[in-house]
Each structure stands twice: as structure tokens, then as C-alpha cells.
Amino acid sequence: MLDQPKTAPATFTGNRALEMEEPLLFEIGRPETSGVDVEEPEPFEDCLGGLERQRPIGLPGLSEPETLRHYVRLSRMNYSIDAGMYPLGSCTMKHNPRLNEKMARLAGFADIHPLQPQSTVQGALEAMEQLTHWLLTLTNMEALALSPKAGAHGEICGLMAIKSAIAARGETATRKIVLVPQSAHGTNPASAALLGFEVRSVPAGDDGIVHAEDVASAVGPDVAAIMLTNPNTCGLFERDIGRIAKLVREAGGYFYCDGANLNAIAGLARPGDFGVDAMHINLHKTFSTPHGGGGPGAGPVALSARLAPFAPAPVLIRKGEKLELNEDVEYGQGFGRIAAFHGQMGMFVRALAYMLSHGGDGLAQASRDAVLSANYVRAKLRGLMSAPYGDRICMHEVLFDDAWLSGSGVTTLDFAKAMIDEGYHPMTIYFPLVAHGAMLIEPTESESKASLDLFIATLRRLGEKALSGESELFHAAPRYAPRRRLDETLAARKPVLRWEGGAT
Ligand SMILES: *Cc1c(COP(=O)(O)O)cnc(C)c1O
């Protein structure tokens, strides 16, 4: 049953005006009900040799209108970028242009099958070729693997290429270390560990960036690669990146750059110019393809000339007029496949539509606007919220910590929950780990000035309440959400993945 807000009387139905309560499908469905009229099958002899099901499967049945209402009501409990601002730092929740959706639904893209003869999907392959061209131009790199299906998957792909390159040099036994800065996204050390590398941590300086001196003392002949994010997860540009790349390369290692945050520099700076060897590009961040429940990710990996021969299959090859997705790993020294087929076609089309509709100048403008939005928020919240790295100009996201809340009885979590009552998806909290009680805000270029102003005014108002002793309001938050504080730790540790209540 719904927890009613303290300020409003409980309702008989649990509904609150147009916000409807909704039980589980299993609680409202009846096995004997169906939305379709299916004829009883003719008697038949099964071939299951006694393994046939002995009792009804017990799936809940609903009529068509009941089904529709169930899912519509659930969807209305969700927050989305279409509903409001979604300032989730590092995740880049930006507007998904409708033009992209329209393009992805064209029958020539949406209704084709990966096993169709390649001669019948030349247009789709050409879209992949164009996307490759754009991504290589934006990064100034040599080769592209399109198939990885998310940023973290791209990390695995890039590191596997590095691993293959090291194996080809006969150094597998000696190069076992991957350097990862403290401020890295958690997926970086996880990817390295998953592939059997040892992770060596590199400290970030007091100014939030990694210093070449610290890399110099960590690098050596045992180092396979460094994984560095630029701009980093504190929203700062890694100023030493050129020197760091040189140090690692001179020591015989490879430079993996986490390019999830390319949206701050696309069209302005090219990672290939920093000496990057491998980098994943989250199409679902920089190039606006829907994610976070709205759609699958896509994390193509750009590779330098020295890693290009180690790209995974399939490889897109042009032979005169014809394009071919080469499935055999007959060429190069690649490690094989990283995923089934060729990647997320629908996301490729959306990302390409985004690029073509913006043009090169428009992509650069989007990057500038994303950085401007974050700095506007930073400048307007200065004096209220504390920033761990002082008043430095940030890139696409701005990092605050919880020092300003100390003594107020309000934590970062309480503050985030109070934002929900005001109709905002909270910012990223408690990440990056290098900032105490971190609050990482990424407004993106999609927000208008009016929208940013309202957001800033809301945070100011909440902040003033927190500092003036109204901590109770925060502890009770969210009061107006369909669900209030859930035990997230319990949910993660003991997930209930099966409905057992009404099983037949
Ligand atoms: C989002 C992100 C990732 C992981 O990308 P997924 O698509 O979620 O797997 C890795 N690194 C950074 C810096 C990110 O922001």
C-alpha cells in the first residue's frame, strides 16, 4: 500500500488524483483470463517423453484494457528526460531528438535481419560506414569497432585489443598492470580485473586531476596500459594528458582513454591528438541515443594505428561500390568477436542522424553549450554549495561535496531525496568517490536558461532550508513520490526476483 504524504489525507483507493497506485501484474491477473480468444488445441500426442508440464503455468492473464492500464500507470511512476530535467552527472541524460527516432524506424533499418544477405542491406552498411567516418574524424583515430553494446563493454573490447597486442609482442607474462586513477568510473578497474590484469591505483592531485609525476612513478615495464577519463569524473580536463600518454607509451604501454564524456569535447578536441590508443564512445551519452530504461547503449571503440590490427570482428570493408561486413578474422590479429552480429543498429542510426542534423559546427556548439550550462550552475550555486576543487572552471559537469551541509543534520542522500519532491531527478550522488558526499550535476546543453534558472533556484531554496535547521523536511523526503525511501542495500543484497505470493 502507498505511503501517503504527511500533508495529504489518505485516499480510499491509494490513488492520488491522477497519480494511480498499481499492484503487480501477478496480484491483479487471473490465469483463466486472456486478452485474446484462443481456440482449444486439437488433441495431440506430445514427444516430451513424460517431461511435459504437470500443472498450469500460472501466468496472470488480463484483458487488453487492463493490460494497457497496468503499463501506462507504471510508466507514469517513472521519471524520464521527456518529463523533466535529469541532471545525472557522468550519465549525460540529454534530449533524444524526435528526428532520430523517425530515422531509426525507417523500414530499411528497423525491419532488416542480421542474417539477411549483405547485398540486400547495403544502405544499412553505408550508414555504419558513415558513422565510422564521423567517429574517426571526431577522434582522429585509425580504426573503429562498432559492435560493443555499452561503455563498459567497450572498455572490455579496448582492453582485449591491448591484451592481444601485448600477446603479439610476447609480453603477456610481464605486462600485467593497468594503471587506474582514483577518480575513475568504477567500470574501469572492474574491466581491467575481469581480463586478468592487476589494477594499480594512481592518486589524483588536490586539484582533482592526475599529475604526470604520479604516473611517472607508477609506470614501468610491467604496465600494460593506463585507463584515464578525459574530461575526468570530477568534470575537469586532464591538463597533463599529453605528457601522461607519452610516459605510458615510452614505457611500452597503451593509453586507454575512457571517452564516455566526449560530449564535453566533441568537435573541439581530438583524443587521437593526445596520443590515445583505445577509447570507447558512448553513443547513448554524447550522441543522444536514449538510455537508462529508454533504450540500449552502444559503445563503439576507436583504436590507434598500433592497435588497429587487433580490432574485433566483424570489420566493415569497402570493396569498390560494395560494402562488406567481414565476419572472418582472417585479417589482422584480432581476438574474435565481442558481441553477436554487428552492434546496435538502431542506435547507430540515431547517432548518425544526430551528427548529420548538427553538422560538425553544431556538434562543437553542443559541446560548448554543455560546458556553459555546467559552469552557469557552478557560478550560480557558488557561495551556497561547497566544491572540493575550489572555483575551477569545469567541463560538462560540476562537482560539489557535502562540506557545506556539515552540522545541518542533512546528508547528501537527504538532499537528493528532497529534490524528488520538487520534481527533479537527483544529480549523481556519492560519486566520484574522491569527493566526500559528492553531488555531481550534469545539466547538458538541452536545458534552456529558464530551465537552469528554476533548477538553481530550487537548489538554493532547499539549501537554505537545510542550513536553517529544517532537517526534518529532508529526513521525511520524498513525501510526494509514489514510493518513498526504499532499502536499496537490502534490494541489492537480497533481490527478490521471483513472485511467490500467488503461485499455482
Ligand atoms: C557511463 C560511463 C561509463 C560506462 O558506460 P555504460 O554504457 O554505462 O557501460 C564508463 N565511464 C564513464 C566515465 C562513464 O560516464
Image: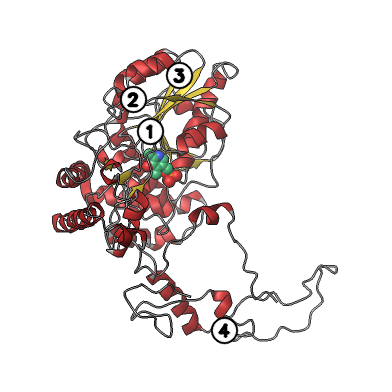
Mark with earlier residue (4, 2): 4
Residue drawn 25% across and 33% down? 389
Relative to 351, is 33 on the left or the right?
A: right
Residue drawn 23% across and 57% down? 465
Say which amino acid is labelled 3. Gly
Tell me the mark number nearer the camera, choosing from 4 and 3. 3
Q: Observer-nearest residue: 490 or 67? A: 490
Badge 3 element? loop
In the rendering, which numbered label is found on residue 253? 3
Q: Is residue 485 above or below residue 280?
A: below
Q: Position of residue 48 (x, y in %)?
A: 81, 68
Q: Observer-nearest residue: 311 or 420? A: 420
In the rendering, which numbered label is found on residue 210? 2
Q: Position of residue 192 (x, y in %)?
A: 51, 31
Mark with earlier residue (1, 2): 1
Relative to 162, is 373 on the left or the right?
A: left
Mark with earlier residue (1, 3): 1
Is the CB of the residue bearing disc 1 within 8 angstroms of ligand 1?
A: no
Badge 1 element? loop
> Which residue is identified by label 4?
36
Say which amino acid is labelled 4. Val
Residue density around tag 1, few if under 14, some if 14–19, many if 20 or more, within 10 Å:
many
Q: Position of residue 15 (x, y in %)?
A: 40, 80
Say which amino acid is labelled 2. Val
